[in-house]
Structures are given as structure tokens and as C-alpha cells.
Amino acid sequence: MNKILARKFVAAGEVLMHEGDEAARAFFIENGSIEIYRTDSDGKDRRVSVAGAGEIIGELAFFADPKTRTASARALEGSTVVTLSQRDIERYIDTMDKPAKALYKIMLKRLLHMNDVMSKNFYNPQHLNEAGQVTISNIREQIKDSDLRTEFDREVVAEFNTFVSKLRTFERKRQAEEGL
């Protein structure tokens, strides 16, 4: 396992990985904090999350096809990371017995799919609305009782639509203040 590990210091503001780059390494954060962000179509960086000591970042791109980064990462403060080589991790996975490897592969496939869906759908109210409408439709289809479906429409769907409307209003105000 020591072949996999190499420590690296990352200065505050230093970019560790770029969205769209080929993935060759994942990073275990020993100390410090790393911001994960995506750049939207307007060129603005949008924070996805902040990872800290004990967390791993950049691992999903190892297993995606193509093997490209879905987000960028930069240090919010001086941080120490341990780099993890994709080749050595894959060799380790190859040592798993067949049932464990099969379970691993199906879980990974599902995780990659959800990461793809999540990373594409939540940047603005329109995307949230579209994702919410799909979710509402899927739930609604499962409700067999017509009275319960009517109640769902009246309470849940109405609240969701109100939320999206308020979010759109807020986003227009934010864009106006920022001169967008």
C-alpha cells in the first residue's frame, strides 16, 4: 500500500485539480480544508462542498468514463493531502473476490450515475424545477389512492411550486445586484 501514498502540501488558494482534466489521482486530506467547485456557464465558480481532514476527494473520476474531473478543487488554507494512484487502487480492487467485486462495481455504477445527475441539475432555479418535476412525477405515479394523490397535488406540489417561484425571484434580485 505504501506505493500508493505520496504526501503533498497545498498552499491556500492553490488549485489541486481542474474540472475537465483527466483524473490520475485521488486525494486524502490529512489536514486543512479543500473547496470543491464547478464553473458555471457564466464563468463563475459555484461551491459544491468543502472537504476537510479525513475525507477523500477526486475519487469518482477514477472510475468514470471518460475519466475526467467533474469539479475543481482548491485549498481554502494550507493543507496536506496524500495522493492516491489510480493504477495501484485498481490493482487492489482486482484482488477482491468475485462477489465483492460485483457488488463494488454495481454500487460504483449507481454512485457515478447519481453524481452525474446531481452535478448537472442544481445550479439555478430552472434546473432545480426540472429535477423536482421529475421527482414529483415519479412519486405521483406511485400513489394509487385518488384522494391521496389530490392531497399530494394540493399540498406538496403547491409548496414546491411556491418554493421555486421564490427562488427565481431571489435569483433575479441577486443577478440584478451583481449586474448580470
Image (cartoon, helix red, strand yellow):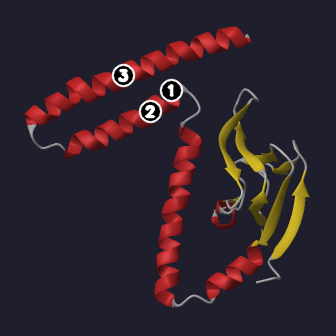
* Between discs 3 and 1, the one toward the N terminus: 1
Quadrant in the picture for the C terminus: top right
Nearer the observer: mark 2 or 3; the answer is 3
Instruction: State the CA–CA distance, disc 2 to disc 1.
Output: 6 Å
Which image quadrant is residue 1 in?
Answer: bottom right
Closer to the camera in the image, 25 or 126: 25
In depth, the one of 45 and 23 nearer the eye is 45
Q: CA distance from mark 2 to mark 3?
A: 11 Å
Query: Circle 2 is placed at which residue position?
Result: 130
- What's under tag 2, amino acid-wise? Glu
SS category of the residue bearing label 1: helix
For badge 3, the amino acid type reads Asn
Where is residue 3? Give x, y as percent: 83, 82
Residue type highlighted by circle 1: Gln
Residue annotated with mark 1: 126
Q: Which one is earlier in the sequence, the residue at label 2 or at label 3?
A: 2
Answer with left or right where residue 61 lies relative to residue 15: left
